[in-house]
Amino acid sequence: MSDLQKLFEQAAKDVQGLSERPDNETLLRLYALYKQGAEGDVHGDKPGFFDFVGTAKYEAWAKLKGTAKDDAMKKYVDLVKKLVG
């Protein structure tokens, strides 16, 4: 396992222990970076119109289409470090 992968997994654990809940924009950014780093480009059908949260998550992830997994992992780790502080 690469060092980046270890940092990424640790950041995913660290984010669960945040003392404050980040704002919605930050949460969407965390979600999108995590998904891009873990799975790559967005896949599957876009959620239905009335699934507001699902649609927001899907669209946030879709904005990162084409971003390399390693780049997404680095950005995720950096963002979590800022939040943990």
Image (cartoon, helix red, strand yellow):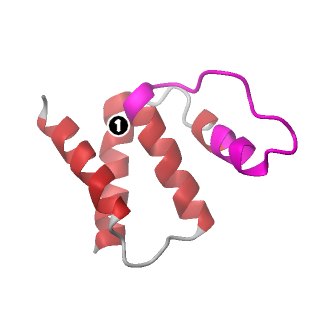
Residue 68: x %, y % from top left: 39, 28
Given the current orientation, which residue lies at the most extreme top position? Answer: 44
From the viewer's side, name the closer residue of 82 and 10: 10
Residue at 31% across / 56% down in the picture? 78
From the viewer's side, name the closer residue of 2 and 65: 2
- Which of the 4 quarters of the picture holds residue 65? top right
Quadrant position of the C terminus in the picture: bottom left
Residue 21: x %, y % from top left: 49, 73
In the image: residue 57, left or right of residue 74: right
From the viewer's side, name the closer residue of 19 and 71: 19
Q: Residues within 10 Å of mark 1 (few under 14, many from 20)?
A: some
In the image: residue 56, left or right of residue 16: right
Looking at the picture, which amino acid does disc 1 mark? Asp
Residue at 68% across / 40% down in the picture? 59
Let me know if residue 54 is in the magenta part. yes
Q: Which residues are magenta?
A: 38-59
SS assignment at label 1: helix
Residue at the disc numbered 1: 71
